[in-house]
Amino acid sequence: MELIILLLCGGLTIIASLLVIFTRNTVHSALWMVTSFFFMAVLYLLLRAEFIAILQIIVYAGAIMMFVIYAIMMLNLRQEEQGPVRKTKVVGVVLLLVLFLELMVVGVGRGLLAIKGPVTDQLMAKFGHVAVLSNFLFSDYVLPFELASILLTAGVVGAVVLAKQKSE
């Protein structure tokens, strides 16, 4: 049963992600992205990462998508006349297919929980999901965590600069 739900949610996530790329209306594209985020949260629940699933819904489907909709309204993006399919969309679909094939190659012959890391069920039972996650995040993975925060800050600054240039 778990495998059926996993395959169903994984397929719906891929379909919603493709609709994000191919939808012409930017608001509809943003709503498909929210749908994709919800299906990802279900996948996290199947992996027994309840805290990450809740963060996925609160942070991405809630706060980040609110900023995306706000940016769409601020930049006054209109539906443009679409000629042939843009090259970037084709490249996006090709990269998505390559990623999907890579995931299939890695997953061949393995079960859902075959790839084991340092986090075990006993560790989770003893300390809890949030404590184990925060311990790894702020000790072993503090450099990638800080680099991700710098990258996100640079993205926000870049978006503001681009919006400022367009309005002038």
Image: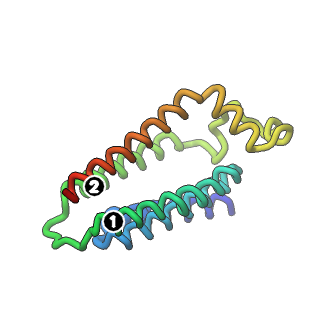
* In-front residue for pair 93/64: 64
Tell me if mark 2 has few (under 14), some (14-19) or many (20+) residues whose alpha carbon lies within 10 angstroms of its own: some
Q: Which residue is mark 1?
A: 74
Which residue appears at 16% of the width and 73% of the height?
A: 81
Which residue appears at 37% of the width and 64% of the height?
A: 20
Residue at the left extreme of this rendering: 83
Q: Count the marks: how many?
A: 2
* In-front residue for pair 110/144: 144
Percent of width and height locating residue 65:
47, 62
Q: Amino acid at mark 1?
A: Met
| Quarter of the view holding residue 16 | bottom left
Q: Which residue is mark 2?
A: 163
Percent of width and height locating residue 132:
74, 37
The vertical placement of 125 against 36, above or below, is above
Q: Gap in Å between the C-alphas at discs 1 and 2? A: 9 Å
Report the side of 102 relative to 74 (left or right): right
